[in-house]
Image: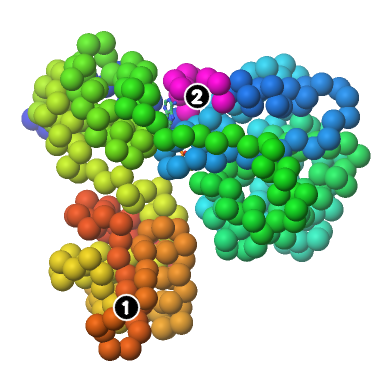
Amino acid sequence: MMHSSDEEYFNSLIKKPTVFKNIGCLSVTYTPPYLPHREEELRTLAKYFKTIFEEQDEPLRKICITGPTGSGKTTLAKRFGQLLENIDKNKNFLLVYINCRIYKSPYLIISTLARKLNKAIPPRGYSFEELQSLLIRLLDFYSPKVLLVLDEIDYLISRVGTDFLYTLLRISEMTTKQWISYIFIARNLNFIHQLDASTQSSFQSNHISLDRYSETDLKDIIKSRSELAFYDSTITEDSVELIADISSKSGDARYAIEILWGAGQCADDESSPIVYPDHVRKAKALIHPEIRREVILTLTLHQKLILLAIIRKLKHTKNAYISTNDAISSYRLACEEYEEEPRRHTQIWSYLKELSKQDVISTKISGEGMRGKTTLISIPDISVETIELFLMKSIENQKKTVEHAEK
Ligand SMILES: Nc1ncnc2c1ncn2[C@@H]1O[C@H](COP(=O)(O)OP(=O)(O)OP(=O)(O)O)[C@@H](O)[C@H]1O
Ligand SMILES: [Mg+2]
């Protein structure tokens, strides 16, 4: 039974006044209904893909969206998918969104697609060839109009090469009608250089390139997101301007929204009914744009341990770079702390390569002044306090899930 003082405490917690009307509207998975400064791009997509709903046999449609981090690529594609879902009254339209950083192999991508068409398909157990022909049969049977969004395709191509892209495009050509249209999302078009000339030119001609957001763009975005998330008049114009100013250096809307969220939290913590610039400043000090938390969550346990080790060593030495040997000895300590068997040298190297591919760390070969050549490691932002805490929490959670699964 709850004691009355506990009850009071609990009540005071849940009834605590808050500036948030709907904090979920600031989460990373939320797709807002209105995207300031991306209206034109939405129209371009609509014009390009309108054939999805026309009856004629149209050639395969595919488009590529590129732009720097936080320029709204993912959100644009997801919002467009929602609009199409609303238009299709017969529900024959199917939006399949796949983030290639999470679904890291061609097999996973094709099996996810197959399972969207028929939930009874088991996730494993087929050979890759069997899975392909199963998908072709499913497409011909259900005759859906699929829009497949492959997000962070550049990352997958750097891991597995370009063959699977051809396989995917071929699947579409092997069905009786071309059921699948594609949106590919990448930071830039560099990944197409590995493709043959005709595929390259089709990517170049169907391409939407998003720019970094300007300070005024960011102001409009912050305003529209605060209207969804905050009660009326709980955030001052000055605060909005300050967030726009801070985030305009990178032009990254994700960073702007994280600060907006943090500033609201600070106001709530201080029981302030209004979000003032000082709350924005406090939030800024806690949030770092360079390392993306979603990326950290997709790392394996030992990749997280090595990253934690690097962060600690960088913090301890106060240098911009550490040597690989230092990283490895610090990793062994971290393994001891978390009671994990350290991985072998070659494995550690492959983790480092993976982290560098994901832009979580950067590496360079040592120049003059050091004996022999060695790989030096750095991370984009040296003020890493919050990331260290976030990583430690994430490692603990992951260990708990593993232990739970083993029982
Ligand atoms: N025009 C906009 N209006 C409102 N919110 C936006 C807009 N553009 C981006 N956002 C928000 O900013 C955040 C980052 O956008 P998004 O994830 O689409 O960026 P991205 O270009 O895919 O970045 P990355 O390359 O890092 O994946 C999301 O929370 C998104 O909701
Ligand atoms: Mg994205």
Q: Nearer the viewer, residue 246 or 88?
A: 246
- The reply to whether residue 74 is in sight is no
How far across and down, in percent of the image, does residue 376 sit?
32, 74
The kind of secondary structure element at disc 1 is: loop
Question: Of label 1 and label 2, which has the lower sequence position?
Answer: 2
Which amino acid, mark 1? Answer: Gly
Amino acid beneath label 2: Arg
| Location of residue 115 in the rendering, given as x and y in whole percent from the top left corner | 70, 45
Q: Residue 367: which numbered mark, if any? A: 1
User: Marks 1 and 2, Cα distance to the nearest angstrom?
Assistant: 44 Å
Q: Is residue 273 visible?
A: yes
x 33%, y 51%: residue: 291
Write the start and end of the magenta stretch as one range. Answer: 31-41
Decide: is 116 above or below 318: above
Depth order, front residue of 403/270: 270
From the viewer's perspective, tell me whether residue 269 is left or right of residue 336: left
| Residue at mark 1: C-beta within 8 A of ligand 1 | no
Considering every residue shown, the one lying at the far right of the view is 176
Residue 336: % across, % down: 26, 77
Tell me: 255 left or right of 405: left
Q: Quadrant of ligand 1?
A: top left
Q: Main secondary structure of the magenta part?
A: loop
According to the picture, the residue beneath numbered tag 2 turns out to be 38
The quarter of the displayed image where residue 184 is located: top right
The answer to if 270 sits in the magenta stretch is: no
Q: At x 32% / y 27%, what residue is drawn?
A: 215
Look at the numbered disc 2 and say if its residue's Cβ is closer than 8 Å to ligand 1.
Answer: yes
Circle 1: is it few (<14), some (14-19), or many (20+) Cα within 10 Å? Answer: few
Name the quarter where the N terminus is drawn. Answer: top left
Q: Left or right: 109 with respect to 266?
A: right
Mark 2 crowdedness (10 Å alpha carbons): few <14, some 14-19, many ≥20: some
